[in-house]
Amino acid sequence: MTTKLTDYKYIKAYFDAVDGGEIRVCKDQYLLIDYLKNRVLNRDDVWLDEKAVENSINVPKKYFPFELFLWQKFIQTFIYGLRWKKDGELVFNIYFVYVGRGSGKNGWIAWNSFYLTSGLNGIKHYDVELNATSEDQAKTSFDDIYSVLEDHPALENSYRKRKEVITNLKTKSRIQFNTANARTKDGKRPGANVFDEVHEYADYKSISVATSGGGKIDDYREFYITTDGQVRGGPLDDLKEESRGILNGELGIDKKGAAYSTMLPLIFRLDSPDEVDNVDNWEKASPSFNFNSSLKTKMLQEYAKMQRNASLRIEFMTKRMNSPIEDTRFAVADYEDVLKTQDEDIPEGVSECIGGIDYAEIRDFCSVGLFFKYKGKTYWKQHTFIYYKALELQNINQDIVDIAVEKGVAEIVHGRKIEPRTVVDWFIEQADKYFIKEICMDEFRASILAPALKEAGFKIKIVRRGRIEHSKMDPTLTSMFIDHTLFFGDDPLMRWYTMNVYKHFLPNDNVEYLKIEKESRKTDGFFAFTHAMAARDDLVDYGEFEDMDTADFGGSGPLVF
């Protein structure tokens, strides 16, 4: 057994290939390698079952008409080998493989489905469910396995194949395919669920039904394999969001902490759309590109055609490169710019501020915050009250909520509703440290909260909500993100809020900030911020006067105006 996990041959080979420039990978792969090296493989409470990994590679190899590529063997290590010493459980049991079309993800799933149902996997009734939104897609990997069984008559003693189900006779494990019809999956006890082309799922209805039976069989696993697509606000965006959290250190492998995730994010894509014009970059999105001559020929043909056809360009960039073409005007900010908001906290000694509130429903989320200006920079400190039943009734990212509560930027509220007094008490507590010049909200929120806040001695300002006010602030807010002069502190909830908003451009060139998806993607903290920002001119940047007082104007005496 390898003493140092990073020296295990498939891990070392992949790391060395990346580090040595033998293969080109995107930034997400570098982040993944850093995450694995420094947060997973260096732990003394995990171990590697090398025999299980070798079996998963060598047993199917006897029957399948292809071999696994290096990137696929690398992944096998974490699907089968990496386990906790304490209980033998898998360290990772969810695998998100976001890879360009043609990279071999369906053949790889067929390979693993074959092995997982075999006797060498060692678990009886380990059923593999192949799920997709269409029957043709759901059958892709199933048909690959069926063909392998047809090509090897000796396997008739081990497998029984039917048009809709393949059964291993020794383990009684089954492989079957399912469409998006949720009723067909209810009541099953799968060993593994595969969700093919996740970008086609608009919601969680069928995914939730399929996964509800998971965990009843040892070593339960979930595979999410997909290219990018056109559906926004669905499961794919959530998986990409969770991947960002893992790769940027907000979620992780620590079983003891709230930021725990068992997902292995395997992201393959271009780092920017303009990289497409250099063929050498294509393996960033399609790691099999340089090892598959027919794939290379096909992609070169498609690239030539897309130069003359916009729709083919969109298809190529979205499906082959995992780099959807989007009009950047519709993004409130790039994710990299949003990440920069965590770089600074409110400077010591800064006191004067403006409050902001967004109170969507008394039994949902309520965000409050304080808006500061200092030396040309803007700071926002938010806090969110979350009505406990909102988490039970809506598909809200629980990991984000757990981290926010742990960091103290959110709290769960019980009772019949979020009481106005809860909001008032927060501002009273903040007033012990800061001078709150006024508290901004729109007219609807004012009808609920203004009387209680006024009674507590706060000045209330009603601001406009919607396209007129958003159009006024948009150039300033856009510059703040681009110039990295806007800071939220270490607040993953506020970053999440921001990424859940898009710009809607109207025919008269006005702008309106809108929510990407109505229920699961909350935006309360962002709109509380825009309410306060609407009154930004009421706030003096005293830091600019401090700079003036200390500036060297070239004279030896006092400055006289």
Image (cartoon, rainbow, N blue to C red):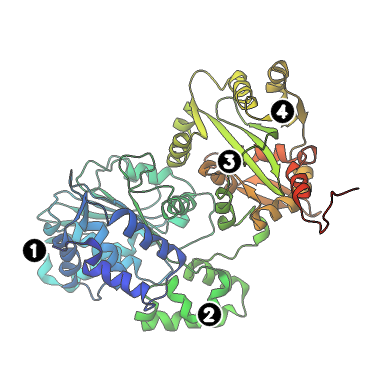
Within-10-Å neighbours for mark 2: few <14, some 14–19, many 20+? some
Give the number of the disc on residue 518: 3
Estimate the spatial distance between the alpha carbons at disc 1 and disc 4, rounded to whole Å.
71 Å
- Nearest-to-viewer mark from 3 and 4: 4
The residue lying at 19 percent from left, 45 percent from top is 218
Estimate the spatial distance between the alpha carbons at disc 3 and disc 2, rounded to whole Å.
37 Å
Estimate the spatial distance between the alpha carbons at disc 3 and disc 4, rounded to whole Å.
19 Å
The answer to which of marks 1 and 4 sits earlier in the sequence is 1
Residue 497 position by quadrant: top right
| Residue that badge 1 annotates | 157
The answer to which of marks 3 and 2 sits earlier in the sequence is 2
| SS at circle 3 | loop
Within-10-Å neighbours for mark 3: few <14, some 14–19, many 20+? few
Residue 74 pos. (x, y %)? 28, 66
Residue 145 pos. (x, y %)? 24, 65
| Residue that badge 4 annotates | 444
The residue lying at 70 percent from left, 29 percent from top is 436
| SS at circle 2 | helix
| SS at circle 4 | helix
Give the number of the disc on residue 303: 2
- Nearest-to-viewer mark from 1 and 4: 4
